[in-house]
Image: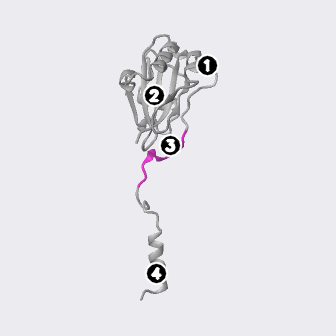
Amino acid sequence: MASDEEYMSFLDKANEDPSKGVAKPQSQGLAKIQFKTTDQGVEIPAALKEVTKDAFYVSDADEPFVPVALSWDEAGKGLPDEEEIAKLINHPDPANAEVEILDPVDWDTQGQYKDIIDAVTKAGKGNDVRVYKISKGGVRVEYWVVTTEGKGKNAKLVGVKALAVES
């Protein structure tokens, strides 16, 4: 027959956190972080305000599209690379952010977001549009559909973003 101490030890062990001692993936905390979508003093183009009124990204979460308007010194190179976009949106670890660059056609294979892409193109006055898939950990990603408006130090990164839950 087990002693009270042995039984309590057994119960303590049974109630331990099963992930105790297991390294948690760094991206776990990203789910709660809200990335920056606007900079103070940067106006959201009218085309983006209009298209995001009733637009949702269809996934397991069906999240609304949110306008994006950020200051971006494009220095003649157009759209930002993976680390630069992570810095612009205040990712806590830009150098290690999980960012994938997609062509809008590859992102919207069914053509269901044509209005979104058209509005972003209009906001950028015809400049290239790019989609950034930014991991928020696990099955959560954000799609940033953006373009540049203007050139040099006074340029802006404008577009929309939406959260997707892809299980």
Disc 3 to disc 1, C-alpha distance? 27 Å
The mark nearer the N terminus, 2 or 3, is: 3
Residue 98 horizontal/vertical position (percent):
40, 37
What kind of colouring is applied to the model shown?
Answer: one colour
Disc 2 to disc 4, C-alpha distance? 56 Å
Q: What residue occupies the far right of the structure in this picture?
A: 41
Which one is in front, 44 or 41?
A: 44
Disc 2 to disc 3, C-alpha distance? 20 Å
Which one is in front, 158 or 104?
A: 104
Label 1: state its secondary structure: loop
Quadrant of the rendered image containing residue 130: top left
The mark nearer the N terminus, 3 or 4, is: 4
Residue 66 horizontal/vertical position (percent):
55, 28
The mark nearer the N terminus, 2 or 4, is: 4
The mark nearer the N terminus, 3 or 1, is: 3
Say which mark, if any, is on residue 7.
4
Q: Is residue 158 above or below residue 82?
A: above
Q: Is residue 71 above or below residue 1?
A: above
Residue type at mark 2: give it.
Answer: Glu
Name the residue carrying label 2: 84
**Residue at screen point 64% across, 21% down:** 41
Label 4: state its secondary structure: helix
Residue 155 horizontal/vertical position (percent):
53, 16
Q: Is residue 35 above or below residue 48?
A: below
Name the residue carrying label 1: 43
Disc 1 to disc 4, C-alpha distance? 65 Å
Q: Which residues are magenta?
A: 23-33
The mark nearer the N terminus, 2 or 1, is: 1
Q: Quadrant of the N terminus?
A: bottom left
